[in-house]
Every structure is written in structure tokens, then in C-alpha cells.
Amino acid sequence: MTAPLPSEKAFIPFVSVENMMRLVHHVGIETMLVELTDAIEADFRRWDLFDKTPRVASHSHDGVIELMPTSDGAVYSFKYVNGHPKNMAQGLQTVTAFGLLAEVSTGYPVLLTEMTLLTALRTAATSAMAARHLAPANARRLALIGNGAQAEFQALAMKAVLGIEEVRLYDIDPKATEKTVRNLGKTGLRLVPCTSAQAAIEGADIITTCTADKQFATILTDNMVGAGVHINAIGGDCPGKTELHRDILLRADTFVEYPPQTRIEGEIQQMDPDYPITELWQVVAGQAQGRSSERQITLFDSVGFAIEDFSALRYVREKLKGTDYFQKLDIIADPDDPRDLFGMLLRAG
């Protein structure tokens, strides 16, 4: 006797890298970045509903492997993600990821997807969301320090969400800058390759640092940062990895995602435990002030948080409706009698 076919409930949609790319082009990259920005902001406005915990990290000499879970009480999500800066020398990605969405009521998964591309998109969207609340009014110039895998996503998100017109680029590897200029060549952005970080930030309204080395680094020194700028520091995302000199933090008003995680992984790991910070969700929800003056230096000390992944996963699930940009995976055992799992196995033989 052959086993009965699984019910539709046993299948879950799986979005491969190929299908994620098809979905992005179907929606449009800039449109998707705008919509993701709005989706993340909407979830930040209901921050109190979510389970929150610092990511579960397994550190090694070579890098880190992490799980990032959260739930709003109705839907649960987690992301698996790694960070291995040395991978680049082997022709491998420094960051890879996949994610899962599930119903809290049954525990059944409802989406499994690649998240290497999706994480790049949601990270850029989160940066744009923060800048929307913290950057100077009518910001038009962006400095991108670090021109690796994140750079183009960051530039396009700032263009689509804030109207950035000029991107000033610097990387210690000139080939990374050449790559970024090539990839952004037809986007309508004015691209200015620079030979130093100092040159890149001259005249910039927003400075984004997105470097990959796992070390205490000083990408920006205090004397480089003038009044009135907004800084998105997104490269520091684990213990022992920073990008900014601590004196910059002494002059800036700092905004974070989830303090228990950021104090371990962010730029503020350099600071005393009582260093003042504001949670970004409070600004988004109108409970705290963001930018308050033209000369204020604002800093978004971003390490990435599970709620941003939750937003991105829910967004993708909605966008899949009416498309064929997914495969159906049979990963849930579905016996006729829920108590007879062994009998299902016997009949399959």
C-alpha cells in the first residue's frame, strides 16, 4: 500500500535565491526598498507586542553563527545568519542567511526563504528608515565608507526613500569602489569615487560605514565628523568589532535598536554602561525626539535586530501571492491520524 499524498497544509513555500531575484525584479528594486522601509517602520510602531531577545551567537576564531528569533504573538520568525570576514579570500560570501516564518497558533511553518539577499535589502531599508527620522532635512549627499556587498543596497535605499542624489564612495580596496560605481552607473545617482574616508565625507549629509573586518577599527575619527551630519554605523555587529572612534559618540546623540544587544555588539560597547541612548522605535512611535537641531550629530548604531527580519519575511510572504516565485516543500509529516506517525512510515514502505 502506498502512503497517501500529503495535504496542502504539509507543503510550505520555499523561496530560493533564484526566485528571490525574480521577485525583486518583478517588484522593482527601489520600489521594494521603499515598501520594506515602510513595513519595518510599521512594526517598529508596535514594538511592545514583540518578544525580544539578543541574538543567540556562537563565536569562533573564524567568525560567528547566529539565530535571531522573535514573535508578535500571532506569527513567529527566526533567521540563521553567519558572519565570516575571512570568507572573501576564498571567494565566499562573508554573510549568508535563511529565514523561517511560522504560525504561533499551530507551530506550522508558512515560509522558508533565502535571506542573504533579503538581509541586504532589509538592512538598507532599516538604514533608510532611521535616516528618515534622524538625518538633516533635504539631505542629498551620502558618503559610503566600505563598498562591499551592502554598498549598492544602501545607496539605492537612500535614493528611493530620502531622495539622495550624490554618493561619495571610499573603500581600502579600490576594486570594491570600481565595482560599486559600475553597478550603480545607470541608477541616476551622481557617483564620486574618493581616495580617502576624509575626502568621501566632505560635504556629506549622511555618512554610512559598512566595513567587514572583525576588529576594533577606527574608520572615522572625531576630527573628521562635522556638525549637523547623520551617521549610520552598520558595520559593527559583534563583540570586538567597531568602526567609530569613541570621541564621536561623546559628541553624538545615539539611537539604537535593542539596547541589550547593541551594548554587546554595537559602537556603544566602547562606552560606559550609563552612556545615554535612545531606542529608535520610540522616535518612530513619537515617544522620543529624533533630530532636534541643525548642528546636532545623530548616530544610528545599528547591529540588525530580529524584528527587521520578521518584517521582511512577512513582506515577502505577502508579495508571493499570485506568483510562481517559490517551490512547495514537503517538510511537515502529515499522517491521516496525527497519533499514527509510525503507521505512516510503515505504509510508505
Image (tube, rainbow, N blue to C red):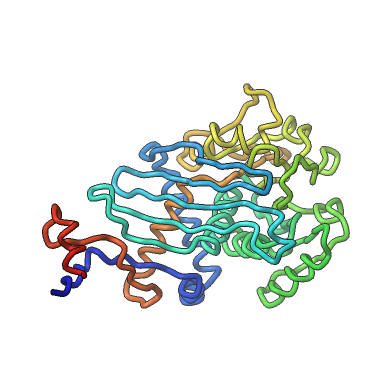
Residue 259 position, x and y percent, is: 55, 33
Query: On the rendered structure, is 127 left or right of 295?
Result: left
- Residue drawn at (48%, 50%), measured in percent from left and top? 308
**Could you tell me how many numbered marks the image carries?**
0
- Residue drawn at (62%, 40%), measured in percent from left and top? 291
Where is residue 101, by image quadrant? bottom left
Query: Nearest the camera: 168 or 139?
Result: 168
Where is residue 60, by image quadrant? top right
- Residue drawn at (44%, 56%), measured in percent from left and top? 99
- Quadrant of the drawing holding the N terminus: bottom left
Query: On the rendered structure, is 172 left or right of 291?
Result: right
Query: Nearest the camera: 324 or 245?
Result: 324
Query: On the rendered structure, is 237 left or right of 51?
Result: right
Where is residue 14, by image quadrant? bottom left
Residue 317 position, x and y percent, is: 37, 63
Residue 87 position, x and y percent, is: 68, 59
Query: Nearest the camera: 273 or 102?
Result: 102
**Residue 218 position (above or below residue 98):** above
- Quadrant of the drawing holding the C terminus: bottom left
- Residue drawn at (69%, 72%), measured in percent from left and top? 184
**Residue 187 position (above or below residue 222):** below
Residue 215 position, x and y percent, is: 74, 43
